[in-house]
Amino acid sequence: MSTPRLLIDIGNTRLKWAWCEPDAPVPATAGLPTPWQHAGAVTHADDGALKTLAAGLRALRGSGPMPAVWIANVAGPVIAAAVDAALVDAFGALAPVQWVRSAAAHGNLANGYREPTQLGVDRWVGAIGAHRWLPHDTLLVVTAGTATTLDIVTVSADGRARFEGGLILPGLALMLGTLARNTAQLPALDVDDAGTVAGANLRWADNTHDAIAAGCLAAQAGAIERTWRALGERGPTRCLLSGGARAALEGALAVPCEMHDNLVLLGLHAMALADA
């Protein structure tokens, strides 16, 4: 990798980014690596966030070459245009950008969606990242963001891999917020509140605050554990957990899981390496 790579994951609520220095070695690990040297996130609601991000990226580049930029975007054209403007602000010109789209296949990973291009690009790229580093394993890929997505990657005896599909649930924060907005007397909770309850391992609660948190966590964990059991009937499965609410969910799960900061960025990294 002779030029830097800038990886950008534009989600529904936040933009996450990572900067990979040229020719930096990928950390040796038995699981999922974090192969970038700088990373961060900004929220869409922060009006000055992209301006601040542009200044930070300009400093990272310094006098070095223009980075190659790989972007997965599920937030639509308005934020895409704002990111283009931020890249010009950062580098003085629009850097070479790959706006990733879902496809029928990537390498030996086939897209089993009925209409492959309709699969959310974040789900597709996250599966690519997970499979790149765990190529022989059946995977349950859980991303706990604005939505909670459960995606399944299987590997056949001849080594061919397939994205089988999955589930989409309201995310933990969305569940908690919907209860507060649509009921007259229930309190508003956030993901940190739910994480505290998960750490206490409550099965049922003796107060409304904890009952809401425990109920929403149980709904999320139940979907994951049910899918885990179904996959387990076929053979060993690895559960991977990513996204902003991952820590709260981990505390509620009764199945083993491995955490990663951002599987979408990991997938973009894998795609950039394959293209080099």
Image (cartoon, helix red, strand yellow):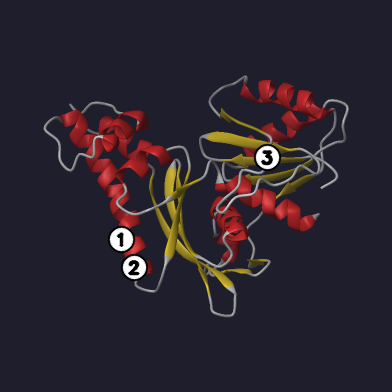
Work out whether residue 269 or residue 121 is closer to the camera in this orientation and state it.
269
Report the Cα–Cα distance between label 3 and label 1: 34 Å
Is the C-beta separation of discs 1 and 2 under 8 Å? Answer: yes
Image spot of residue 120 (x, y percent): 54, 54
Query: Three-letter amino acid code at disc 1?
Result: Arg
Report the Cα–Cα distance between label 1 and label 2: 6 Å
Residue for badge 2: 230
Name the mark on residue 244.
Answer: none
Q: Nearer the viewer, mark 3 or mark 1?
A: 3
Image spot of residue 174 (x, y percent): 36, 38
Work out whether residue 199 or residue 244 is closer to the camera in this orientation and state it.
199
Q: Count all numbered tags in the image, as a single digit.
A: 3
216 vs 111: above or below: above
Q: Earlier in the sequence, mark 3 or mark 1?
A: 3
Residue for badge 3: 36
Query: Three-letter amino acid code at disc 3?
Result: Trp
Q: Residue 16, located in which quarter of the rendered image?
A: top right
Q: How many residues crowd mark 1 within 10 Å: few (<14), some (14–19), many (20+)?
A: few
Image spot of residue 265 (x, y percent): 62, 45
Q: Residue 56, located in which quarter of the rendered image?
A: top right
Q: Secondary structure at mark 1?
A: helix
Query: Three-letter amino acid code at disc 2?
Result: Ala
Report the Cα–Cα distance between label 3 and label 2: 35 Å
Work out whether residue 21 or residue 113 is closer to the camera in this orientation and state it.
21
Residue for badge 1: 226
Residue at x 78%, y 25% (from the top left corner): 58
* In this rendering, position of residue 158 left or right of residue 139: right
Residue at x 57%, y 70% (from the top left corner): 161
Q: Secondary structure at mark 3?
A: loop
180 vs 122: above or below: above
Q: How many residues crowd mark 3 within 10 Å: few (<14), some (14–19), many (20+)?
A: many
Name of the residue lying farthest toward the left: 206
